[in-house]
């Protein structure tokens, strides 16, 4: 660990792990969020001049991973400080930074992120949510739909990805808008999910939502640059979320294998039990290294390099998490399906990192096209 992490990072990891152990699997989300914010963990990646810790994704991913490993992950960290906080810090106006970053840093304000649409899926170029200039003001009017938006009911606003129509060329350009939760015409309906999580999933309908001119984040013409500045952190933090979950499941399985005795020795002494657990541990450690690489490249300003590494990290962590959870449940046998051990619910939850925010198949497309230079099939 000391080879790839500074002493400061090791100290942060130990402190957050201690916080996670105090709350544990039965944690109260609001209480933990508030305490993590007061301790400076939620905004560790945001600029110091706006109340943050002055760090980067390397630090923020440590926080989420360790909370997840303790059984109390905060999913909204993927969105509020990582995506929205990063985009506003990099591209927002001075007024937007002063208004939002201090609250995002201490956890007193939160923001959701809306990009996925029913007919667009992983193809962000097909986004149809449209923003047009209001005829009677210098503001904007948004219309469209979004799906699978996390935590809209508990956040103050949603950073919505829309498109503006260019009057000269007729082309559509992606832009990001801050939409308050109580904006007129901004409707939400909860999606009935098998996955049980504190942060619920919503479908959004934007029906002539009127916004002031300063709701637009950054430059109207920046488009994809601003969008992907938020998507790379999303992938890194999703990897951290998955790794924390995988470590949590593996720790439970190892403890059980070390103490559970059926014949004359603990079941962990048998290679049929020990080797799959060792393999799961190796895969988690390999994914952690790629996640750290991705965070380092992003924090160093290498957006192109971070894009490749972030996608690889998300892919590797998602696969490692699923296999760790499966093996943990299998190690405990029937006990792995009981509420007492809390592993059964992870069978569904672990699949999230394979599916969202981008599927593993689309990551393989990205690597085959961008890294290997192979032709596209679409």
Image (cartoon, rainbow, N blue to C red):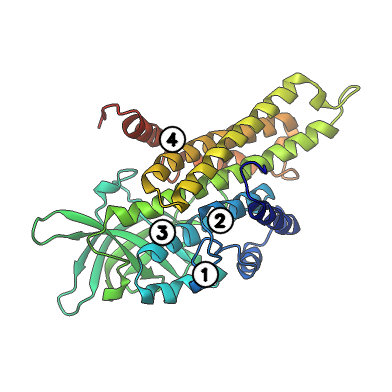
Which callout, 3 or 2, points at the residue further toward the start of the chain?
Answer: 2
Residue shown at the point (61%, 49%) measured from the top left? 65
Q: Which label number is shown at residue 60?
A: 2
Work out how far the residue at label 1 is from the one at label 3, CA to CA, in angstroms: 23 Å
Residue 233 spot, x, y in % from top left = 45, 51
Residue 330 spot, x, y in % from top left = 69, 29
Q: Are marks 3 and 2 in contact (CB under 8 Å)?
A: no
Q: Are marks 3 and 4 in contact (CB under 8 Å)?
A: no
Say which element carries label 3.
strand
Packing grade of label 3 (10 A; few <14, some 14-19, many >=20) is: many
Classify residue 31 by image quadrant.
bottom right
Q: To which residue does mark 4 refer? A: 360
Q: Does residue 147 appear in the picture of this structure? A: no
Out of 198 and 48, give the one closest to the viewer: 48
Residue shown at the point (36%, 32%) measured from the top left? 371
Q: To which residue does mark 3 refer? A: 113
Q: To which residue does mark 1 refer? A: 48
Q: Which label number is shown at residue 63?
A: none
Residue shown at the point (48%, 44%) measured from the top left? 294
Say which element carries label 4.
helix
Say which element carries label 1.
helix
Packing grade of label 1 (10 A; few <14, some 14-19, many >=20) is: some
As drawn, is 180 to the left or to the right of 129?
right
Q: Does residue 264 appear in the picture of this structure? A: yes
Which callout, 1 or 2, points at the residue further toward the start of the chain?
Answer: 1
Work out how far the residue at label 4 is from the one at label 1, CA to CA, in angstroms: 35 Å
Say which element carries label 2.
helix
Furthest toward the right, the residue is 264
Work out how far the residue at label 4 is from the one at label 2, CA to CA, in angstroms: 23 Å
């Amino acid at each position: 660990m000391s080879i790839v992490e500074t002493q400061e990072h090791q100290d942060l990891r130990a402190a957050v792990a201690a916080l996670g152990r105090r709350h544990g699997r039965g944690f109260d989300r609001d209480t933990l969020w508030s305490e993590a914010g007061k301790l400076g963990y939620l905004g560790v990646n945001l600029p110091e001049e706006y109340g943050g810790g002055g760090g980067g994704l390397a630090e923020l991913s440590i926080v989420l991973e360790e909370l997840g490993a303790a059984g109390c992950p905060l999913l909204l960290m993927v969105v509020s400080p990582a995506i929205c906080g990063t985009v506003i810090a990099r591209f927002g106006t001075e007024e937007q930074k002063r208004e939002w970053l201090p609250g995002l840093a201490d956890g007193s304000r939160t923001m959701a992120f809306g990009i996925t649409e029913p007919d667009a899926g992983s193809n962000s170029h097909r986004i149809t949510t449209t923003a047009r200039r209001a005829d009677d003001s210098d503001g904007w009017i948004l219309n469209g739909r979004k799906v699978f938006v996390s935590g809209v009911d508990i956040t103050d606003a949603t950073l919505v990805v829309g498109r503006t129509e260019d009057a000269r060329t007729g082309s559509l350009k992606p832009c990001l808008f801050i939409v308050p939760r109580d904006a007129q015409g901004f409707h939400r309906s909860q999606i009935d999910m098998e996955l049980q999580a504190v942060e619920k999933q919503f479908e959004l309908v934007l029906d002539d939502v009127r916004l002031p001119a300063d709701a637009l984040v950054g430059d109207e013409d920046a488009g994809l640059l601003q969008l992907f500045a938020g998507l790379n952190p999303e992938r890194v933090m999703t990897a951290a979320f998955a790794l924390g979950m995988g470590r949590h499941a593996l720790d439970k399985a190892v403890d059980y294998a070390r103490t559970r005795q059926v014949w004359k020795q603990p079941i962990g002494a048998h290679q049929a039990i020990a080797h799959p657990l060792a393999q799961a541990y190796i895969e988690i450690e390999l994914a952690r290294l790629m996640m750290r690489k991705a965070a380092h490249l992003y924090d160093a300003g290498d957006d192109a390099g971070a894009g490749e590494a972030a996608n690889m990290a998300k892919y590797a962590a998602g696969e490692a998490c699923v296999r760790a959870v499966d093996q943990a449940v299998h190690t405990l046998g029937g006990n792995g399906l009981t509420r007492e051990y809390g592993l059964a619910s992870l069978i569904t939850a672990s699949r999230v990192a394979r599916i969202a925010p981008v599927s593993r198949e689309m990551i393989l497309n990205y690597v085959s096209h961008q890294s290997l230079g192979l032709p596209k099939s679409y």
